[in-house]
Image: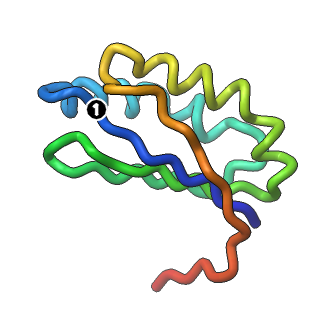
């Protein structure tokens, strides 16, 4: 399993509109090949992270164009274009 982790910062006052846009895009995001889990966290100041758990690094890399296109839909809300990093998942626990 592979995790694509992306730090981002929304412009002031855009949190609600960005969240609404995200909810509209849920099926598009979850339909990406290999997507297992998608977590988006954001503070009141618009700073946040996306953690996407994907079956493998290869599948995550193959999704790069679709991921960039998804982020492009948030261009009016973002302070800058996010840059993802990736990690091998060594634990994925939940209750």
Q: Is residue 12 above or below residue 55?
A: above
Where residue 21 sits, quadrant-wise, is top left
Say left or right for 84 vs 18. right
Q: Residues within 10 Å of mark 1 (few under 14, many from 20)?
A: many
Which residue lies at the image location 14% right of the left edge and 46% below the top edge? Answer: 44
Could you say where residue 15 lies in the image, as x and y percent from the top left? 21, 33
Residue 26 position in % (x across, y down): 49, 35
Q: Image check: 76 left or right of 2?
A: left
Q: Is residue 17 above or below residue 85?
A: above
Q: Quadrant of residue 11?
A: top left
Q: Nearer the viewer, residue 7 or 33?
A: 7
Q: Report the residue at 19% width, 31% height from top.
A: 16
Q: Secondary structure at mark 1?
A: loop
Residue 10's x, y, as percent?
28, 32
Q: Is residue 34 left or right of residue 25?
A: right
Between 37 and 82, which is closer to the camera in this rendering? Answer: 82
Q: Position of residue 69 (x, y in %)?
A: 60, 20
Residue with the most extreme right position: 58
Residue sitting at x 76%, y 66% = 1
Determine which residue is flagged by label 1.
10
Image point 71% across, 55% down: which residue? 54
6 vs 69, nearest the viewer = 6
Coloring basis for residues: rainbow
52 lies left or right of 16? right
């Amino acid at each position: 399993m592979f995790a694509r982790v992306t730090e981002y910062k929304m412009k002031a006052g855009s949190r609600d509109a960005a969240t609404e846009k995200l909810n509209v895009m849920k099926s598009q995001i979850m339909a990406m090949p290999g997507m297992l889990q998608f977590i988006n966290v954001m503070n009141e100041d618009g700073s946040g992270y996306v953690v996407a758990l994907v079956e493998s690094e290869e599948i995550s890399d193959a999704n790069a164009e679709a991921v960039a296109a998804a982020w492009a839909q948030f261009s009016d809300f973002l302070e800058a274009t996010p840059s993802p990093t990736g990690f091998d998942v060594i634990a994925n626990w939940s209750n």
